[in-house]
Image (tube, rainbow, N blue to C red):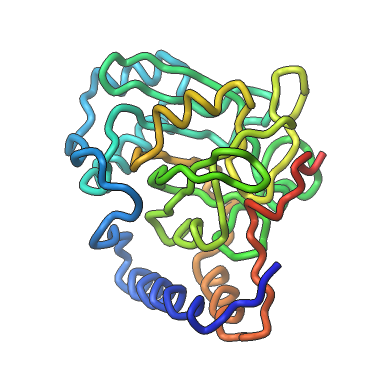
Amino acid sequence: MYRMTFTKLLPLALILTASLAACAGGNDSAPSSAPGDQKWPAGPTTLPNTLLNEAIKGGVPTNVANLAFNKYDQFSGLVRNADFITIIDYTRNSGKPRMWMVNTKTGDVDSLLVAHGSGSDPNNTGTPIRFSNVPDSKMTSLGAYLVSEQFQSSEHGTAMRLDGLERSNSLARDRGILIHSAKYVKSSLSKMGMSWGCAAIPLDWIAKALSRLSGGSFMYAYGPPSSVDTDVTDELKIQEIMTNPSYMWVNEGEEAPVEGVL
């Protein structure tokens, strides 16, 4: 853990101010500039219905696919790697494939296992029931993301940072939430181990994920709406953390146990 400094508080304060303004106006507007690399051109404004149909045929639940594609339309101007979109359905148990990589050019869909945060599944049932943007919650955050730059994680090998695009996940980067590989995510388990909020995937999938998704691709994480901690409650917790200079801020990606929470 490390202590938050006022240089850390400044960007978070700006995020909170923007979030509260969005709450007041009821508008989940995207940031004015996209974080991460700028290697790819902006993605297509709208994904074709034929691709939506292919995603559904490939196993993405219809309601989840529709929400994901609508969110893509909302944030398409920030997408810089339009080759794949990633969709996760956290209403499913972790023992089942619930992450899909959709090839936007061919319509091919790959499904794979993915872990969720231990704070989201306090009874370790394999199905998350709570989601949050609050630092140190060890919970998974829902909503639209950019899968951003690759970096060498000290605990998990090469990983990818995530940038949240909505109030529900705006602190993903500051929390250290990643896509990384983990040995506790594999088909031989009836339910996966748990991360501290990261989307941990099988070891044999990380190379493909790195080549397909990094540099600004779109990801959407879905969960049961009734289980989401309220925005107001989250914002109050975040404000309390940010205004306490002695608060110890946990890197929920790097400091999580490598073996996961089993």
Q: Residue at x 32, y 18 (%)?
A: 53
Q: Nearer the viewer, residue 72 or 158?
A: 158
Q: Residue at x 60, y 74 (%)?
A: 237
Residue 182 in the image: x percent, y percent? Answer: 68, 34
Q: Nearer the viewer, residue 1 or 17?
A: 1
Whether residue 188 sits left or right of residue 135 in the image: it is right
Residue 112 in the image: x percent, y percent? Answer: 56, 22
Q: Nearer the viewer, residue 193 or 54?
A: 193
Q: Residue at x 78, y 37 (%)?
A: 125
The image quarter containing residue 116 is top right
Residue 191 in the image: x percent, y percent? Answer: 75, 28
Whether residue 147 sits left or right of residue 242 in the image: it is left
Q: Is residue 231 above or below residue 169?
A: below
Instruction: Pick the quarter of the image with the C terminus.
Output: top right
Q: Is residue 136 above or below residue 60?
A: below
Instruction: Pick the quarter of the image with the N terminus.
Output: bottom right
Q: Residue at x 70, y 18 (%)?
A: 187
Q: Is residue 120 above or below residue 80?
A: below
The image quarter containing residue 260 is top right
Q: Nearer the viewer, residue 245 or 25?
A: 245
Q: Is residue 8 above or below residue 230?
A: below
